[in-house]
Image: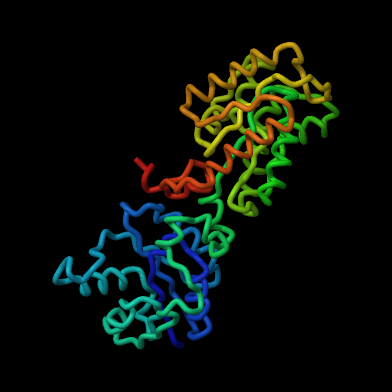
Amino acid sequence: MKRGMVLGKFLPPHLGHLYLGEFARQFVDDLTIVVGTLRAEPIPGQLRFHWMRELFPFDNVVHLDEELPQHPEEHPCFWEFWRDALLRVLPAAPDYVFASESYGEPLARLFGAQFVAVDPARTIVSVSGTAIRANPMTYWNYLPRCVRPYFVRRVCVFGPESTGKTTLAANLARSFDTVWAPEYARVLIESQNGRVESADMERIARGQAASEDALALNANRLLLCDTDLLTTHIWNDVLFQQESPWIRQAADSRDYDLYLLLDVDVPWIDDVVRYRPDDRATFFNRCRLELETRGRRFVEIRGDWNTRFTMARAAIEQLMTEPPSYPPKRNPLMSIGDDSRSA
Protein backbone atom coordinates (compact mmCIF):
# COMPACT_ATOMS: atom_id res chain seq x y z
CA MET A 1 0.00 0.00 0.00
CA LYS A 2 1.33 3.41 -1.00
CA ARG A 3 0.59 6.22 1.46
CA GLY A 4 0.48 9.91 0.66
CA MET A 5 0.36 13.15 2.65
CA VAL A 6 -0.87 16.65 1.88
CA LEU A 7 -0.08 19.42 4.37
CA GLY A 8 -1.67 22.85 4.23
CA LYS A 9 -3.26 25.72 6.10
CA PHE A 10 -6.31 25.81 3.82
CA LEU A 11 -6.86 29.45 4.71
CA PRO A 12 -9.51 29.06 3.31
CA PRO A 13 -9.92 25.87 1.26
CA HIS A 14 -10.35 26.69 -2.44
CA LEU A 15 -10.47 24.91 -5.78
CA GLY A 16 -6.68 24.75 -5.92
CA HIS A 17 -6.71 22.76 -2.69
CA LEU A 18 -9.44 20.52 -4.07
CA TYR A 19 -7.31 19.77 -7.11
CA LEU A 20 -4.28 19.08 -4.91
CA GLY A 21 -6.17 16.66 -2.68
CA GLU A 22 -7.99 14.92 -5.51
CA PHE A 23 -4.73 14.56 -7.49
CA ALA A 24 -3.06 12.98 -4.46
CA ARG A 25 -6.01 10.69 -3.86
CA GLN A 26 -5.73 9.31 -7.41
CA PHE A 27 -1.96 8.82 -7.01
CA VAL A 28 -1.88 6.71 -3.83
CA ASP A 29 -3.87 4.02 -2.07
CA ASP A 30 -4.20 5.85 1.23
CA LEU A 31 -4.17 9.65 1.68
CA THR A 32 -3.82 11.73 4.83
CA ILE A 33 -4.54 15.46 4.66
CA VAL A 34 -3.00 17.46 7.51
CA VAL A 35 -4.68 20.77 8.35
CA GLY A 36 -1.99 22.84 10.10
CA THR A 37 -3.31 25.85 12.01
CA LEU A 38 -2.29 28.56 14.45
CA ARG A 39 -4.57 30.38 16.87
CA ALA A 40 -3.61 33.81 15.53
CA GLU A 41 -4.72 33.07 11.96
CA PRO A 42 -7.76 34.99 10.67
CA ILE A 43 -10.01 31.94 10.07
CA PRO A 44 -10.46 29.54 13.02
CA GLY A 45 -8.44 26.35 12.65
CA GLN A 46 -11.21 24.05 13.83
CA LEU A 47 -13.49 25.47 11.16
CA ARG A 48 -10.93 24.81 8.43
CA PHE A 49 -10.52 21.26 9.73
CA HIS A 50 -14.30 20.85 9.60
CA TRP A 51 -14.40 22.15 6.00
CA MET A 52 -11.65 19.79 4.86
CA ARG A 53 -13.35 16.79 6.43
CA GLU A 54 -16.51 17.72 4.55
CA LEU A 55 -14.61 18.16 1.28
CA PHE A 56 -12.62 14.92 1.66
CA PRO A 57 -14.96 12.54 3.52
CA PHE A 58 -13.26 9.38 2.23
CA ASP A 59 -9.71 10.39 3.15
CA ASN A 60 -7.97 10.67 6.50
CA VAL A 61 -8.12 14.35 7.49
CA VAL A 62 -6.25 15.26 10.69
CA HIS A 63 -5.76 18.51 12.57
CA LEU A 64 -2.30 19.71 13.61
CA ASP A 65 -2.92 22.66 15.90
CA GLU A 66 0.46 22.90 17.65
CA GLU A 67 2.04 26.35 17.74
CA LEU A 68 5.00 25.52 15.51
CA PRO A 69 7.45 27.90 13.80
CA GLN A 70 6.37 28.67 10.25
CA HIS A 71 9.72 29.33 8.55
CA PRO A 72 13.10 27.53 8.86
CA GLU A 73 14.90 30.73 9.86
CA GLU A 74 12.71 31.03 12.96
CA HIS A 75 14.39 28.13 14.77
CA PRO A 76 17.44 25.89 14.14
CA CYS A 77 15.34 22.79 14.87
CA PHE A 78 12.52 23.86 12.56
CA TRP A 79 12.38 20.66 10.49
CA GLU A 80 12.80 18.39 13.49
CA PHE A 81 9.86 20.11 15.21
CA TRP A 82 7.67 19.58 12.16
CA ARG A 83 8.73 15.95 11.68
CA ASP A 84 7.94 15.06 15.29
CA ALA A 85 4.62 16.95 15.25
CA LEU A 86 3.51 15.31 12.01
CA LEU A 87 4.39 11.85 13.29
CA ARG A 88 2.10 12.51 16.25
CA VAL A 89 -0.93 12.96 13.95
CA LEU A 90 -0.10 10.76 10.96
CA PRO A 91 -1.28 7.13 11.05
CA ALA A 92 2.02 6.14 9.37
CA ALA A 93 4.94 7.83 7.63
CA PRO A 94 4.06 8.72 4.02
CA ASP A 95 5.66 7.31 0.90
CA TYR A 96 4.76 10.43 -1.09
CA VAL A 97 4.34 14.08 -0.15
CA PHE A 98 2.18 16.21 -2.46
CA ALA A 99 2.45 20.01 -2.61
CA SER A 100 2.35 23.00 -4.90
CA GLU A 101 4.60 24.97 -2.55
CA SER A 102 8.40 24.95 -2.24
CA TYR A 103 8.30 23.37 1.23
CA GLY A 104 7.13 20.08 -0.28
CA GLU A 105 10.57 18.75 -1.20
CA PRO A 106 12.35 19.26 2.15
CA LEU A 107 9.22 18.03 3.90
CA ALA A 108 9.34 14.80 1.92
CA ARG A 109 12.99 14.27 2.84
CA LEU A 110 12.05 14.22 6.53
CA PHE A 111 10.26 10.91 5.96
CA GLY A 112 12.44 9.49 3.21
CA ALA A 113 9.44 10.00 0.95
CA GLN A 114 9.18 11.03 -2.68
CA PHE A 115 8.06 14.60 -3.40
CA VAL A 116 5.33 15.05 -6.02
CA ALA A 117 4.88 18.61 -7.34
CA VAL A 118 1.26 19.24 -8.33
CA ASP A 119 0.71 22.80 -9.59
CA PRO A 120 3.64 25.00 -8.49
CA ALA A 121 3.12 27.56 -11.28
CA ARG A 122 -0.62 27.84 -10.51
CA THR A 123 -1.43 27.25 -14.16
CA ILE A 124 -4.17 24.70 -13.45
CA VAL A 125 -6.00 26.65 -10.73
CA SER A 126 -4.84 30.25 -10.63
CA VAL A 127 -5.79 31.40 -7.15
CA SER A 128 -4.36 31.67 -3.65
CA GLY A 129 -5.73 31.85 -0.15
CA THR A 130 -4.12 35.28 0.28
CA ALA A 131 -6.01 36.66 -2.72
CA ILE A 132 -9.29 35.16 -1.53
CA ARG A 133 -8.96 36.57 1.99
CA ALA A 134 -8.27 40.03 0.58
CA ASN A 135 -11.24 39.97 -1.79
CA PRO A 136 -13.50 36.92 -1.47
CA MET A 137 -16.20 38.45 -3.68
CA THR A 138 -13.84 38.64 -6.66
CA TYR A 139 -12.77 35.01 -6.23
CA TRP A 140 -16.19 33.68 -5.25
CA ASN A 141 -16.24 30.97 -7.92
CA TYR A 142 -13.04 29.47 -6.46
CA LEU A 143 -14.71 28.82 -3.10
CA PRO A 144 -16.27 25.39 -2.42
CA ARG A 145 -19.94 25.40 -1.52
CA CYS A 146 -19.37 24.58 2.15
CA VAL A 147 -16.93 27.50 2.57
CA ARG A 148 -19.09 30.21 0.98
CA PRO A 149 -21.42 30.84 3.97
CA TYR A 150 -18.40 32.07 5.95
CA PHE A 151 -17.87 34.92 3.47
CA VAL A 152 -21.43 35.60 2.31
CA ARG A 153 -22.77 39.05 3.17
CA ARG A 154 -26.04 38.78 5.07
CA VAL A 155 -28.62 41.56 4.81
CA CYS A 156 -31.78 41.47 6.93
CA VAL A 157 -34.95 43.23 5.76
CA PHE A 158 -36.40 44.25 9.11
CA GLY A 159 -39.31 46.12 10.60
CA PRO A 160 -43.07 46.24 11.26
CA GLU A 161 -45.84 44.42 9.48
CA SER A 162 -47.05 45.42 6.02
CA THR A 163 -44.05 47.54 5.08
CA GLY A 164 -43.06 45.52 2.00
CA LYS A 165 -40.32 43.38 3.55
CA THR A 166 -41.09 40.23 1.58
CA THR A 167 -41.47 42.00 -1.75
CA LEU A 168 -38.31 44.02 -1.19
CA ALA A 169 -36.26 40.96 -0.18
CA ALA A 170 -37.41 39.03 -3.25
CA ASN A 171 -36.78 41.96 -5.62
CA LEU A 172 -33.33 42.63 -4.19
CA ALA A 173 -32.41 38.95 -4.50
CA ARG A 174 -33.39 39.00 -8.18
CA SER A 175 -31.46 42.22 -8.71
CA PHE A 176 -28.28 40.77 -7.18
CA ASP A 177 -28.78 37.33 -8.77
CA THR A 178 -28.87 35.55 -5.44
CA VAL A 179 -31.26 33.81 -3.05
CA TRP A 180 -33.41 35.09 -0.20
CA ALA A 181 -34.71 33.47 2.96
CA PRO A 182 -38.47 33.98 3.38
CA GLU A 183 -40.06 34.68 6.75
CA TYR A 184 -40.50 31.26 8.33
CA ALA A 185 -43.23 32.56 10.66
CA ARG A 186 -45.50 32.94 7.63
CA VAL A 187 -44.80 29.35 6.55
CA LEU A 188 -45.70 27.96 9.97
CA ILE A 189 -48.71 30.20 10.65
CA GLU A 190 -50.24 29.65 7.22
CA SER A 191 -49.86 25.89 7.74
CA GLN A 192 -51.95 26.35 10.92
CA ASN A 193 -54.67 28.40 9.15
CA GLY A 194 -53.56 31.66 10.75
CA ARG A 195 -53.29 30.33 14.30
CA VAL A 196 -50.19 31.07 16.36
CA GLU A 197 -49.56 30.13 19.98
CA SER A 198 -46.80 30.96 22.43
CA ALA A 199 -45.35 27.47 22.06
CA ASP A 200 -44.84 28.15 18.34
CA MET A 201 -42.32 30.94 18.84
CA GLU A 202 -39.28 28.75 19.37
CA ARG A 203 -40.26 26.66 16.34
CA ILE A 204 -40.47 29.85 14.31
CA ALA A 205 -37.02 30.95 15.49
CA ARG A 206 -35.46 27.56 14.75
CA GLY A 207 -37.12 27.46 11.35
CA GLN A 208 -35.89 30.93 10.45
CA ALA A 209 -32.32 30.09 11.44
CA ALA A 210 -32.41 26.75 9.61
CA SER A 211 -33.75 28.35 6.44
CA GLU A 212 -31.10 31.09 6.42
CA ASP A 213 -28.21 28.71 7.03
CA ALA A 214 -29.41 26.23 4.42
CA LEU A 215 -29.84 28.96 1.80
CA ALA A 216 -26.47 30.55 2.62
CA LEU A 217 -24.89 27.54 0.92
CA ASN A 218 -26.54 28.59 -2.36
CA ALA A 219 -26.11 32.34 -2.05
CA ASN A 220 -24.18 34.29 -4.67
CA ARG A 221 -22.05 36.51 -2.43
CA LEU A 222 -25.16 37.95 -0.75
CA LEU A 223 -28.05 36.47 1.24
CA LEU A 224 -31.24 38.50 1.73
CA CYS A 225 -33.24 37.56 4.83
CA ASP A 226 -36.90 38.50 5.28
CA THR A 227 -36.76 39.19 9.04
CA ASP A 228 -34.59 37.34 11.59
CA LEU A 229 -34.62 35.86 15.07
CA LEU A 230 -34.57 39.31 16.64
CA THR A 231 -37.96 39.83 15.01
CA THR A 232 -39.18 36.63 16.65
CA HIS A 233 -37.88 37.85 19.99
CA ILE A 234 -39.84 41.11 19.64
CA TRP A 235 -43.04 39.39 18.56
CA ASN A 236 -42.78 36.94 21.46
CA ASP A 237 -42.99 39.91 23.79
CA VAL A 238 -45.65 41.82 21.81
CA LEU A 239 -48.04 38.91 21.30
CA PHE A 240 -47.53 36.85 24.44
CA GLN A 241 -45.73 39.15 26.92
CA GLN A 242 -43.06 36.51 27.40
CA GLU A 243 -39.38 36.09 26.77
CA SER A 244 -37.60 32.92 25.72
CA PRO A 245 -33.98 32.86 26.92
CA TRP A 246 -33.14 30.56 24.01
CA ILE A 247 -34.65 32.89 21.39
CA ARG A 248 -32.94 35.92 22.93
CA GLN A 249 -29.55 34.18 23.03
CA ALA A 250 -29.96 32.89 19.48
CA ALA A 251 -30.98 36.35 18.25
CA ASP A 252 -27.97 37.94 19.95
CA SER A 253 -25.57 35.35 18.52
CA ARG A 254 -26.65 35.92 14.91
CA ASP A 255 -25.49 39.20 13.44
CA TYR A 256 -25.88 40.58 9.93
CA ASP A 257 -23.70 42.81 7.84
CA LEU A 258 -26.57 45.23 7.35
CA TYR A 259 -30.18 45.71 8.41
CA LEU A 260 -32.68 47.50 6.19
CA LEU A 261 -35.20 48.96 8.67
CA LEU A 262 -38.45 49.66 6.82
CA ASP A 263 -40.56 52.62 7.91
CA VAL A 264 -44.37 52.56 8.16
CA ASP A 265 -45.05 55.31 5.59
CA VAL A 266 -46.91 52.93 3.24
CA PRO A 267 -50.55 51.74 3.37
CA TRP A 268 -51.57 48.81 5.52
CA ILE A 269 -52.56 45.70 3.56
CA ASP A 270 -54.55 43.15 5.53
CA ASP A 271 -53.29 39.56 5.70
CA VAL A 272 -53.99 36.40 7.70
CA VAL A 273 -50.60 36.64 9.44
CA ARG A 274 -50.78 40.36 10.30
CA TYR A 275 -52.11 41.43 13.68
CA ARG A 276 -51.60 45.06 14.68
CA PRO A 277 -52.58 47.60 11.98
CA ASP A 278 -52.79 50.50 14.44
CA ASP A 279 -49.49 49.93 16.21
CA ARG A 280 -46.91 49.94 13.44
CA ALA A 281 -45.18 53.15 14.53
CA THR A 282 -44.65 51.78 18.05
CA PHE A 283 -43.31 48.53 16.60
CA PHE A 284 -40.97 50.48 14.29
CA ASN A 285 -39.53 52.37 17.27
CA ARG A 286 -39.08 49.09 19.14
CA CYS A 287 -37.22 47.61 16.16
CA ARG A 288 -34.89 50.59 15.96
CA LEU A 289 -34.23 50.49 19.70
CA GLU A 290 -33.35 46.77 19.57
CA LEU A 291 -30.87 47.41 16.75
CA GLU A 292 -29.31 50.40 18.49
CA THR A 293 -29.02 48.51 21.79
CA ARG A 294 -27.09 45.73 20.07
CA GLY A 295 -24.92 48.06 18.01
CA ARG A 296 -26.23 46.62 14.74
CA ARG A 297 -25.55 48.44 11.50
CA PHE A 298 -28.78 49.58 9.87
CA VAL A 299 -30.22 51.96 7.29
CA GLU A 300 -33.77 53.30 7.52
CA ILE A 301 -35.72 52.74 4.31
CA ARG A 302 -38.78 54.87 3.54
CA GLY A 303 -40.77 56.38 0.69
CA ASP A 304 -42.80 54.77 -2.09
CA TRP A 305 -42.01 51.27 -3.34
CA ASN A 306 -39.58 52.40 -6.04
CA THR A 307 -37.77 54.72 -3.66
CA ARG A 308 -37.44 51.94 -1.10
CA PHE A 309 -35.90 49.60 -3.65
CA THR A 310 -33.47 52.29 -4.85
CA MET A 311 -32.39 53.16 -1.31
CA ALA A 312 -31.97 49.53 -0.32
CA ARG A 313 -30.01 48.61 -3.43
CA ALA A 314 -27.65 51.55 -2.96
CA ALA A 315 -26.98 50.53 0.66
CA ILE A 316 -26.19 46.95 -0.39
CA GLU A 317 -23.97 48.06 -3.26
CA GLN A 318 -21.94 50.08 -0.79
CA LEU A 319 -21.69 47.08 1.55
CA MET A 320 -20.49 44.80 -1.24
CA THR A 321 -17.58 47.09 -2.08
CA GLU A 322 -16.22 47.09 1.48
CA PRO A 323 -13.23 44.89 2.34
CA PRO A 324 -13.89 41.85 4.51
CA SER A 325 -13.34 41.84 8.24
CA TYR A 326 -12.13 38.82 10.19
CA PRO A 327 -14.01 37.19 11.64
CA PRO A 328 -17.02 38.19 9.53
CA LYS A 329 -20.42 38.75 11.12
CA ARG A 330 -21.33 35.97 13.49
CA ASN A 331 -23.57 33.04 12.57
CA PRO A 332 -23.62 29.42 13.76
CA LEU A 333 -21.87 28.08 10.65
CA MET A 334 -18.82 30.05 11.77
CA SER A 335 -18.88 28.97 15.40
CA ILE A 336 -17.49 25.45 14.96
CA GLY A 337 -14.45 25.52 17.22
CA ASP A 338 -14.14 29.29 16.87
CA ASP A 339 -10.71 29.71 18.45
CA SER A 340 -11.08 33.46 18.79
CA ARG A 341 -14.18 33.09 20.97
CA SER A 342 -13.45 29.94 22.91
CA ALA A 343 -12.57 31.59 26.20
On the image, the x and y values in percent for residue 88 come to 31, 69
Judge from the rendering whether residue 98 lies leftward or rightward of residue 22; answer left or right: left
On the image, the x and y values in percent for residue 321 come to 51, 47
296 vs 213, nearest the viewer: 296
296 vs 147, nearest the viewer: 296
Looking at the rendered structure, the number of numbered marks drawn on it comes to: 0
271 vs 48, nearest the viewer: 271
Colour pattern = rainbow
Occupied quadrant, residue 205: top right
Occupied quadrant, residue 102: bottom left
175 vs 110, nearest the viewer: 175
Query: Residue at 68% of width from left, 42% of height from top?
Result: 172
Query: In the picture, which quadrant includes the C terminus?
Result: top left
Judge from the rendering whether residue 37 lies leftward or rightward of residue 181; answer left or right: left
Q: Is residue 158 above or below residue 116?
A: above
On the image, the x and y values in percent for residue 284 come to 63, 18
- Residue lying furthest right: 193
